[in-house]
Image (cartoon, rainbow, N blue to C red):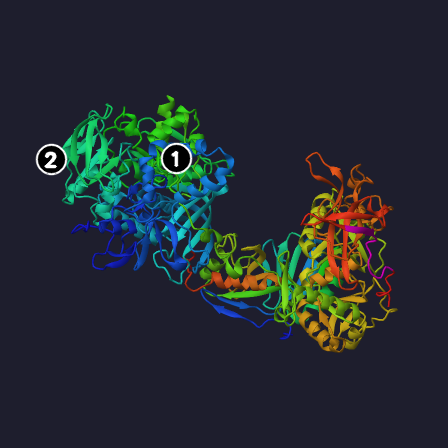
Amino acid sequence: MFDAATTKETTRFEGLVTVEDTGLAGMITIRGARSEIGGAMSDTVGLPVPETLRVTTDGRRSLAWMSPDELMLFCGHEEAADLAARLAEATARAHALILDMSDARTLFTLTGAEASLREVLAKLTPADMRTQAFPRGMIRRTRLAQVSGAIWWADDGSLRVMCFRSVADYVRGLLCHAAHPASWVGHFRD
Amino acid sequence: MSHRLSSGGRLIDRATSVRFTFNGTYLRGHPGDTLASALLASGRSLLGRSFKYHRPRGLVASGAEEPNALLGLGTGDRFEPNQRATTSELFENASTTSQNHWPTLDFDIGAANTALSRFLPAGFYYKMFIHPRPLWKHVYEPFIRRSAGLGKAPAPESRDPDRYEHFYLHTDVLIVGGGIAGLAAAKAAGEAGAEVLLIEQTPHWGGRAPVDGGEIDGLDPEAWIQRTVSELEAMPNVRLRTRTMGSGVYDHGYALAYERIADHEPGSEAPRHRLWRIRASRIVTATGALERPLAFAGNDVPGVMLASAVRDYVVNYGVAPGKRTVIVTNNDDAYRTALTLRDAGLDVPAIVDARPEGGGALMAEARARGIRILTNRGIAKVKGGKKVKAVAICNQQGEGGVLDVIPCDCVAMSGGWSPVVHLWSHAGGKLTWDEKEIFFRPDPSRAPTGADGQAFVIAAGSANGHLGQGEILTDAANAGAEAAGQGTSSAPQGAARDEAPIAPVWMMPANANPALRRKAWLDFQNDVKVSDVMLAAQEGYESVEHTKRYTTLGMATDQGKLSNINGLATLAQALGEAIPAVGTTTFRPPYTPISLSAIAGEARGDLFQPIRKTPLHEWHEANGAAWEPVGHWRRPYCYLRGGETKKDAVIREINQTRTSLGLLDASTLGKIIVKGPDAARFMDMLYTNMMSSLKVGACRYGLMCSENGFLMDDGVVARLDEDTFLCHTTTGGAERIHAHMEDFLQTEWWDWKVWVVNATEQYAQIGVVGPNSRKVLEKLGGMDLSKDALPFMRWTEGELAGIPARVFRISFSGELSFEVAVPANKGRALWDKLFEAGEEFGVTPYGTEALHVMRAEKGFIMIGDETDGTVIPQDLGLHWAISKKKEDYIGKRAQARSHMDNPDRWQLVGLETLDGSVLPEGSYAIADGKNANGQRNTQGRVTSTYYSPTLERGIAVGLVHNGPTRMGEEIEFNKVDGGTIRTRITSTVFFDAEGEKQNV
């Protein structure tokens, strides 16, 4: 349900990597102890609960570790409200907070050579972007220049960047600046 | 006259020529030249004037330590002052200008200071300009500012057109310096399996070795360097980067490196500079050593250069600094310069060696080549003004009696070498004085240590005090292996050092008379002489740090790279102390100046600072919003129509809202969800009033205080269900209050079952305000918002015009008012529909100023206006919002302190000027008498003041001593022009005190 009147047009920038707005996505914030809600969560979503700093996915939905007591479920924007309600019901007897936060954040998709993706991100985040520190399947909550954000690998080898919607223009600008075609560093290699 | 030799110059491409200008004159150089070598090749020996005396100055060095050759480089937006000619690569059409002279470089009026130099010793300004005080500001300071200083700042309207960026890197080993030590260390560390980043500040690998000669692993140094660089490039775990300077080393293995990507290609699309922000487990400083000048009279005359620099220009650039060069030295290394000059076919009339016995094998070689060698001799003085004409020779142990005069056009001096210990020292590495070599070297037993308690900086090669090629290579290979966590490594083979000992020579001649000492420079850029340091000692300056500041020794842009050791040795001698007892000044980053733009990185222009935008931001922008920054948000202050002023716009917005319909973008308000079995208990602790009694479906205004009892935020709380609350915070408070909640949940009440989530950005929130607000919402349809269905201070959920919405019936304006929250992506759709439906009511968007005025008319407080971190709710008459029933809440105990529970505190009242004018912001109510400081006593102050279009007069609220008991009393508030305004104390509610307007 992409509402053109209320959402920016998708932008695309081609440089060292390609930077695109991912478009609308369902994002459900889940707070609760893994031991209390892990089972119900997994059954409802159909995905295993991720280990620390990991993302589990079936290609359609992804479940990302956000902190020791927080997960985020990525799903279709249209199914988010219903899924959030089902999750709330499934965890009703536990101490949990399920919130549909699909509109609070903006996602970007970065595609390109893996080394270039690491390099573009390394211009903005103090997190270690080396393969051994940020392998496929990992999510990092970190800073992107002056704002908070999260980065993780999608299973197709592209990179997702997430930030709060209010600073989407700023983060888009950062990513395009870092991906400027003449700014290749050549430190990371495939 | 060209000084370019007919052959040689390993770094230049003779086949191509590059055109550039110096002070407007066209000159030519070759690709590979530095600005310095190209200027020298063109016969330009006079490149600038000194800082204080405006003495003519030329090149002294060939690298980062150069104190004199600072140029203005570039034009227009790309003009930069103080660019070091020795480290700036020549490029086509480079425009260079000399600095610090007037009117011209050749004829400078300021040079009269030289004649007065006797009367301008160290500390002169301090002594002279203290009295009378007014003269300092109006006479002395403007004069000194005009005559001092180096380059001129770029024009104020110029804008840097280039791009900059940062690069964060984590690695095992960072090696700073790409000479043979850095290369050997990188090879050892790389072979041991470590991830290595090797950086070199110049565009070339190998450092001094190709100039100094020798043999490494049986190869010419140049060949060994090439071979090693290719070996390193082939290693997958090693990265090499030239034009990248190790700028600073900080705690925890953090280091900054400064990459000059495009300085030599102005206008290129590439980022000009890149700042590397590196986390390394180990840092190897293979930063080499710098040659020291000798202190003799006239050692600053253009043509007097470091011996190593003289041979650098000959070997690297095929440039002869002079045709007849006298060498003066206290060590063997300078003999290499004599041999190099001879090899290039240049004349060396004499080598003046201050040591009684002279040198070792290198001296023998020079003698065998027929070079005249004078031992136990020194230079009494250099003859010449703008260039060297001759040197007067004297006995080194004497007072300067002239024995001989040798005509020459260049003097190559060497006072020995000092390891570059800067990066070792930045994070606390200590030094030890080496008596034999006469320099400070890193003390490995007192290295900077990391989190593991182990040394994280390892000095290598000549930076570690080794001056022989063989010793350097062995030390560096071991350093590399150690950094990689291995014991030792097989080192490349080089010859062991075979040199006679250096002799300490801090003044030449040793007993130079005062006239000579006054012409013997220590710090070239800042014009500090041997006589200045001796004067400082005589005047009681014992600490090297104090002497530095008194004399300005080492305070110039070269940060004492040449002057440091000579200066402190001179001080030690004058104080009769040992050099290590005097110690060094502190080494601080950056190693050489780095651009502010590199530090800013991408943070300029549109990316200077994140600007938070609401879902309606674009609409505001397209509809005349005059922006007001609120935190990082931009909110419309008002919307300008036609040619109206902001004041007119605010009046129009208020009138239209009060009489019909206004819309407010309230999306920036914080929205925090609090949920759990202990949520109600938690809410009772957070807020001063009772929240646990709030019914599901109801709203309540609440106050939050800090632990010290001060009011820190307010807002409306809605109970969503038995276990769930929605807390509205102020715009600026959302992140702070969320953190405040997490803080208490994680550290104090960790066993309470409560989750909090900051849902601020999930919603667009629109205030629909005014007598016609219900009508417009009813037109959208979908929800029953009648008085009975949704009474004041209730909320409900449903769909408005098909958009899922939560509607709060709350009012911050006194009008009938609804706040509608919808998913952020639907915010614009709702806004557009409200405009469409509201057209018949003259729907008017209003900004923050109208919001402020309307709330002030109603006597509602504003966090940040009525509060400033020292105000408690009781000061604001908010006792009704403080629960007496609750056992505790955050701030309760603090509010019971005697200073808080005190009737003498200033309290909030309304203020009406008798003449209807608007009180100035921040105005104080005056009281009788004066305080201990002779200031007028006060009895209150204005916290908010506005023109009220509703009442057509000025209204204000403020904190007044015993205010609430003084209703009707008239007091005086001060004005900026010195007068006062008679003002009556009133209720804080100016409009619709009964609340009838919202009760419909």
Amino acid residing under circle 1: Leu
Q: Chain of mark 1?
A: B
Residue B394: which disc? Answer: none
* Place of residue B668 in the rendered image (x, y in percent of width and height, measured from the top left): 68, 61
Q: Residue at x 76, y 72 (%)?
A: B799
Q: Position of residue B692 (x, y in %)?
A: 83, 53
Identify the residue position indicated by label 2 in the image.
B370
Picture quadrant of residue B164: bottom left
- Distance from Cα at disc 2 to Cα at disc 1: 40 Å
Q: Can you say whether B87 is above or below B855 in the image? A: above
In the rendered image, residue B89 lying in the magenta stretch gets the answer no
Secondary structure at badge 1 equals loop
Per the rendered image, the range of residues in magenta is: B982-993
Marks 2, 1: nearer the viewer: 1
Callouts 2 and 1 close, C-beta under 8 Å: no
The residue at 35%/59% (across/down) is B265
Q: Callout 2: residue from which chain?
A: B
Q: Quadrant of the C terminus of chain B?
A: bottom right
At label 2, counting other C-alpha atoms closer than 10 Å, the crowd grade (few under 14, some 14-19, many 20 or more) is few
Q: Amino acid type of disc 2?
A: Gly
Q: Are marks 2 and 1 on the same chain?
A: yes
Q: Residue at x 28, y 57 (%)?
A: B20
Mark 2 / mark 1, whichever is N-terminal: 2
Which residue is tagged 1? B553
